[in-house]
């Protein structure tokens, strides 16, 4: 099999081989799972992108201490889900005993889908969100002290 223009191309005889299909669908499933996390974090970014701008322009943000802590908890849970609780970056057990050719196919599709790079980008977004929330928490604490 080969990938060309985001299309997996394989001959008829390979398309009937369920083991080959496993080498293809595992990284596709991992990529799909990662896309769910990417979308959820993008929603959080879109939801809170105005907070630093509001703070910069008005000097205040209308969030309670509880709301800020809830946001911190939400970001932390998402970060844990991506990095600790999922198998997005793990090579499935199925491939531990598989042939070198099948492992190479899995690795090639995993790399083509840029899963490791996408997790790095997602973690960078987590860090930015965490820094923003830390800043808001500090601002809120200083404002009420």
Image (spheres, helix red, strand yellow):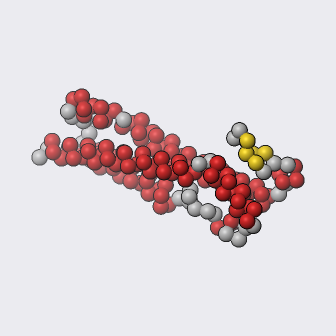
Most extreme residue toward the right is 13
Front-most of 143 and 131?
131
Q: Position of residue 105 (x, y in %)?
A: 72, 56
Most extreme residue toward the top is 57
Front-most of 5 and 132?
5
Q: Above or below — where is 104 with respect to 113?
A: below
Residue under the point 25% across and 34% down: 55
Residue under the point 21% across and 34% down: 60
Is any part of residue 33 visible from this angle?
no
140 lies left or right of 43 = left
Q: Above or below — where is 128 with respect to 24?
A: above
Q: Position of residue 106 (x, y in %)?
A: 69, 57
Residue under the point 26% across and 39% down: 63
In which quadrant of the rendered view does residue 53 lie? top left
Residue under the point 61% across and 62% down: 91
Is any part of residue 58 visible from this angle?
yes
Q: Position of residue 45 (x, y in %)?
A: 41, 39
31 lies left or right of 69 = right
In which quadrant of the rendered view does residue 96 lie? bottom right
Q: Above or below — where is 86 with respect to 56?
A: below
104 lies left or right of 80 = right
Q: Position of residue 136 (x, y in %)?
A: 26, 43
């Amino acid at each position: 099999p080969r990938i060309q223009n985001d299309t997996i191309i394989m001959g008829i005889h390979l398309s009937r081989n369920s083991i080959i299909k496993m080498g293809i669908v595992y990284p596709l499933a991992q990529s799909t799972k990662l896309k769910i996390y990417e979308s959820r974090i993008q929603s959080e970014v879109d939801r809170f992108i105005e907070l630093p701008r509001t703070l910069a322009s008005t000097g205040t943000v209308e969030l309670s201490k509880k709301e800020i802590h809830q946001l911190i908890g939400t970001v932390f849970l998402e970060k844990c889900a991506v990095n600790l609780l999922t198998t997005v970056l793990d090579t499935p057990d199925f491939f531990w005993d598989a042939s070198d050719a099948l492992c190479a196919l899995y690795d090639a599709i995993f790399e083509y889908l840029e899963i490791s790079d996408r997790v790095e980008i997602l973690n960078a977004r987590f860090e930015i969100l965490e820094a923003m929330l830390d800043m808001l928490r500090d601002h809120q604490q200083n404002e009420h002290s």
